[in-house]
Amino acid sequence: MKKCFKNLGLAVLLSFLFSFAAKAQTDTTKTIDTTKANAIREKLITTICTCVSQKDPSSIKTADDVQALVMNCFMGDGLSLLMDYAKASGVDISNSDQMRAMGEKLGEELSLNCPTMMKMMMNVVKDSTQYNKLMQDNKKN
């Protein structure tokens, strides 16, 4: 009888440990809600475009000017949306590679869907030295 209780106790303990481990795994799994992520991304792109549009495109002459302006917009008006988008997309904000990849996708979408951004990029490309710098930066990334 004592051996039966010992085996039962061991079985209960093992099942508890396995169920605890299974729960811990499900808690750390990121759930990606693509509908929510897409809605936040659209709002983020619109917010950044609005921020960028407040600057006169002709005052932007270099790739560094564009980068500084976009970063200011992301870090100002768009910061909370950026964090919400990362979370909804399942991106780990402490993972620099994931954040960089997300930023590149957002930048590409911004440059394609924001007319002011397109004008600024055209101003930069007009200067051949800036065009060459952009191409070199693009090759590095």
Image (cartoon, grey):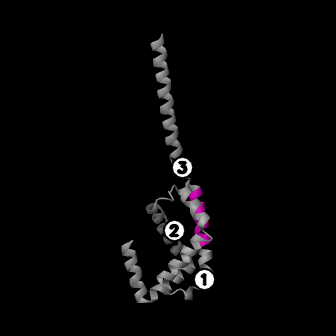
Q: CA distance from mark 3 to mark 2?
A: 21 Å
Q: What residue type is disc 3 on?
A: Thr
* Residue at mark 2: 106
Residue 63 is situated, as x and y percent measured from the top left of the image, at 47, 82
Residue 28 is situated, as x and y percent measured from the top left of the image, at 51, 46
**Residue 117 visible:** yes
Q: What residue type is disc 1 on?
A: Lys
**Is residue 104 left or right of 87 when viewed as pictured?**
left
Quarter occupied by the C terminus:
bottom left
* Residue at mark 3: 31
**Are the residues at dot 1 and dot 2 in contact (C-beta closer than 8 Å)?**
no
Q: CA distance from mark 1 to mark 2?
A: 19 Å
Q: Nearer the viewer, residue 71 or 104?
A: 71
**Are the residues at dot 3 and dot 1 in contact (C-beta closer than 8 Å)?**
no
Q: Nearer the viewer, residue 1 or 140?
A: 1
Residue 43 occupies which quadrant of the picture?
bottom right
Q: What residue type is disc 2 on?
A: Leu
At horizontal 45% and vertical 13% (from top left) the residue drawn is: 3
The magenta-colored residue range is 36-48
Q: Dot 2 surroundings within 10 Å: few (below 14), some, or many (20 or more)?
A: some
Residue 76 is situated, as x and y percent measured from the top left of the image, at 61, 71
* Residue at mark 1: 55
At horizontal 60% and vertical 61% (from top left) the residue drawn is: 39
Secondary structure of the residue carrying numbered label 1: loop
Of the residues under marks 3 and 1, which one precedes in the sequence? 3
